[in-house]
Image: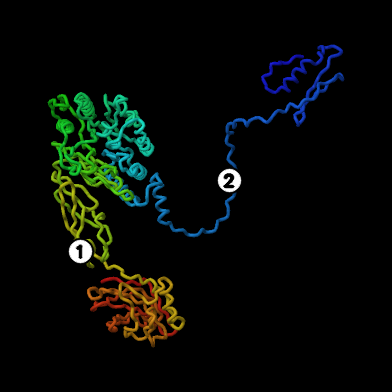
Amino acid sequence: MSYNTEFQNNNGELQEILNTINDLPEASGSGENGATFTPSVSEEGVLSWTNDKGLDNPDPVNIKGEKGDKGDTGATGATGATGAKGDKGDKGDKGDSYTLTATDKTEIATMIGGDVSVPTYWQSELETKADAIQTAMEKAGKNKSAFLWYTDAHWVNGNSKMSPKLLNYLYMNTPMNKVNFGGDIIGDTLLATREEMKYLYEWRKAIKDLPNHHSVFGNHDMFDLSSVDYEDDNYRYAFLLAPEESSDMVMGDGNYYYIDNPCEKTRYLYIAYLVGDGTAMLKQGQFICDAIKAVPEGWHIVAIAHRWWQYSKSSTPTSGAISAYEAEMLSIFDAYNARETRSGSNYFYTQDFTEAKGKVEFCIGGHIHVDYDIESEGGIPVIITTSDTNQNRVPDSTVDCGTVGTITESAVYGIIADYNDPQNTKITVVGVGRGTSRVVRPSGIKPTSITDITYSGNTTIGATIDKSLFSFTVNYSNGTTDTVNGATSVSPATIGVVGNNTVTVTYTEGATTLSGTATIVGTPVPVVNLLNLDRTYVTGTVGESIGKSYLDESKAYTNVVQGTQAFNASACTVSGVSEDGVTVKEAGIGGMSVAYPVYLPDISTNSYVLSFDYTGDGSSRVWYKYATANGVIDQNVLACNKTGSGHIDYTIPSASGFAWLLIFVGANTGKTTTLSNVSLTKA
């Protein structure tokens, strides 16, 4: 027999065994001396031999080597069949009730928002503004251009790094599905070497979960983000636009492009900040013109650029002018909307827009670090928003600075253009944080009056009038109308009287402020909760102890003080008033009665209504006494010797100064009185 002796194994003992096998006596296939050697291996790994001819066997050898390395995990097996449904278990014990804490609510809300790190001081602001965005999106439906927005972040110049979290919350809690950035992410006055620019990856990581995030270049992105070691446009592109590449971007020769949203029928132009390079500006200008000419019938155009307005000094950012390049660009848009031919100029070739099919609806940008809206000569709105940084641009101004740790530390926006009324496009700007909310409309369409004012808030006496709960119709100069929720201001600030309250409502849109009046019917307000009096009183089984009990159970009154006046029982000439200031006994009424002291500081100018339902079986009584430091000024039995059920509304007249109201409940021996729905309201 012969075995392969070129065994590829480092185990010398195994190789020796193979050699031994090959040296065994050969047995002829049919000869007399042929022997069959049979191997066997014990559990301990010892290899031994036997043969059927009684020949010498090779010596036993332990072939168990050292323990090898653990093998790779095998593939997961197929899922087994679903087991039979088990029997229904016994009903568990009812768990303890749990009330969500403020921390619980914040954690839940922020987790729903997609980022558990949103601080609690942002929660109310985010919820309110998310509701405003939701409302505007619902009204607009499909006829809109809508996106989340922020600009001038200057990531390393005092930025709180909060905007990605805010935008993510709004994305998770509104129908918004895209985010546009207005440029200037680069740090002001910093070197823009590859090593220095690594902070941009922190920004990229923070915005990675935002949908359809697209940017334009600002002046700092163009000038600060450059290096003698790299071709400028490619270097800038790699840092800012390459991470945002998508299949729907149509790029120009430079760092400018457009994206179509067929659902909205909107073409978004992303215009690069250019200055001083006439050739590049002409190229971008022609790209813009070709893009808007190719828009399908009935489509909308939104132009996004970093700068539309150039201030003369940052301390007065709204003092300045539209710069030359942007002024020509707006003139192009006006000619397009007017279906005109425009002659060539410094930055644009001659253009024929007589066959244009779309409309430039609005432009949006930043640069001046404040909220400020302008318009083209043809009336196209230009929305300018404040910066997202907290940069202090010394020595000129701190106008764009917020306070880190408050909602002024950041500024992001929801932008919703509603095209349902083609004659009166409504652009809702929802400012979040430091950003200003407002409504922007095309030039020439001005609000003229507000009518049909309604109020859905609390109308009880003394309630604060909430300006956000007004709804009214705004009438415009071109005959169109719009329903608006939320007033700019209201006067007076509170509901003053029972009955008709005349309230002046103001609404500001752009440079126009309108006012109108509404009638709010004031209703009595419960000034004291007397539900502790809702109980059954049985003469002879209660007494002074009950009087103490029902007060002490919920409020633990001892020597009651309301306002600045203590209840001085000894100074009130009321029979049976105890000195502890809690319980008042009245002699001769079956040995039982209790009283509840209520301080009424404005009794000289207001009267009150004491109301309750009662059930009695005869000889039951409910009555009150007014007491001041000078004695009882009024008293009356409200329900005496009543059988059955009834309702009492009793007006307690006004008196000079302040007073204590003492409410008594009593019954003759063996009789009962049950009170419910006890309240005290201003008349």
Amino acid carrying mark 2 in the image: Lys
According to the image, label 2 marks what residue? 85
User: Quadrant where the C terminus lies?
Assistant: bottom left
Q: Please state if 523 lies on the left or on the right of 245 as rendered.
A: left
Quadrant housing residue 639: bottom left
Bin the neighbour count of mark 2 within 10 Å (Cα to Cα): few under 14, some 14-19, many 20 and up. few
Q: Nearer the viewer, residue 483 or 245?
A: 245
| Residue that appears at 34% across and 43% down | 161
Bin the neighbour count of mark 1 within 10 Å (Cα to Cα): few under 14, some 14-19, many 20 and up. some
User: Quadrant where the N terminus lies?
Assistant: top right
| Distance from the alpha carbon under mark 2 to that under mark 1 | 66 Å
Q: Which of 164 and 550 is in front in this view?
A: 164
Q: Which mark is residue 501?
A: 1
Position of residue 355 relative to residue 595, above or below, is above
Residue 591 location (% of width, % of height) = 42, 85
Residue 414 location (% of width, % of height) = 28, 43
Residue 46 location (% of width, % of height) = 77, 28
Q: Secondary structure under badge 1?
A: strand
Residue ranking furthest to the bottom: 588
Quadrant housing residue 39: top right
Amino acid carrying mark 1 in the image: Asn
Q: Which of 198 and 679 is in front in this view?
A: 198
Residue 627 location (% of width, % of height) = 30, 81
Q: Please state if 342 lies on the left or on the right of 123 as rendered.
A: left
